[in-house]
């Protein structure tokens, strides 16, 4: 049976996602705080990451306009694309000053957005693989029947608590008294040695 991926892998990818997301939000806060408030909380959505890769600066978003932004976002966010496009263009109107470093940030933001999209896909792939392996594990029905134990907790139990081999332990046959490693054999030898 395939070994389950370590839960540390999942924790590491979550930490990386948080770190990259914080970098994107930090850059947006430096160049356009109102835009960060509109985009930052939604960095987990593919439509927002796609938007930042296509138009990473406030000037590019402003030039694209609400209609083009909505059209692009509707591909990945059919229910919220129009609302988010309106919120983004409204946020853009709240700041007319171009902050120093905006052009440099516009070079970094699309790369960070692409990295964030890749990390999220990797995390989702690992989660799907873990779910598949947990479902195939012989202890899955027992573990998931316990209150509060789902796929993630079951995976953690199987990787961190259960031994790598889940077959029941076999009892070793007790050593024979004639066996040189048996305690009574050693005491017999001592008795013989002391009597001689």
Image (cartoon, rainbow, N blue to C red):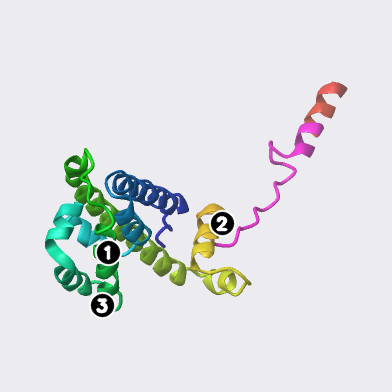
Name the residue nearer the viewer: 36 or 191. Answer: 36
Residue stretch rendered in magenta on the structure:
167-187
Mark 3, Cα crowd under 10 Å, few <14 / some 14-19 / many 20+, is few
Q: Residue under circle 3?
A: 78
Q: CA distance from mark 1 to mark 3?
A: 20 Å
Name the residue nearer the viewer: 42 or 192. Answer: 42
**Residue at 18% from the left image edge and 46% from the top image edge:** 106
Camera sees residue 54: no
Q: Are circles 2 and 1 on residues that touch, CB within 8 Å?
A: no
Query: Residue 1's x, y, as percent?
Result: 41, 62
Label 2 secondary element? loop
Mark 2, Cα crowd under 10 Å, few <14 / some 14-19 / many 20+, is few
**Residue at 85% from the left image edge and 22% from the top image edge:** 194
Choose the circle earlier in sequence order: 2 or 1: 1
Q: Residue under circle 1?
A: 90
Query: Residue 118's x, y, as percent?
Result: 26, 55
**Residue at 56% from the left image edge and 56% from the top image edge:** 162
Residue 170, compared with residue 145, is above or below; it is: above
User: Would residue 194 be counted in the magenta stretch?
Assistant: no
């Amino acid at each position: 049976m395939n070994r389950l991926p370590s839960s540390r892998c999942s924790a590491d990818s979550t930490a990386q996602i948080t770190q990259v997301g914080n970098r994107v939000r930090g850059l947006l806060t430096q160049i356009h705080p109102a835009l960060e408030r509109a985009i930052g909380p939604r960095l987990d959505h593919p439509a927002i990451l796609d938007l930042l890769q296509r138009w990473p600066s406030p000037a590019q978003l402003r030039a694209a306009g609400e209609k083009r932004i909505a059209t692009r976002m509707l591909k990945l966010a059919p229910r919220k694309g129009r609302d988010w496009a309106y919120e983004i263009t409204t946020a853009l109107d709240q700041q007319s000053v171009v902050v120093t470093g905006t052009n440099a940030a516009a070079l970094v933001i699309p790369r960070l957005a692409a990295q964030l999209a890749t990390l999220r896909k990797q995390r989702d792939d690992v989660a799907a693989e873990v779910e598949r392996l947990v479902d195939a594990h012989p202890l899955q029905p027992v573990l998931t029947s316990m209150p509060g134990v789902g796929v993630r907790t079951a995976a953690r139990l199987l990787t961190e608590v259960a031994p790598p081999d889940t077959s029941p332990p076999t009892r070793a046959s007790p050593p024979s008294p004639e066996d040189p490693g048996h305690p009574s054999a050693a005491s017999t030898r001592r008795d013989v040695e002391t009597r001689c």
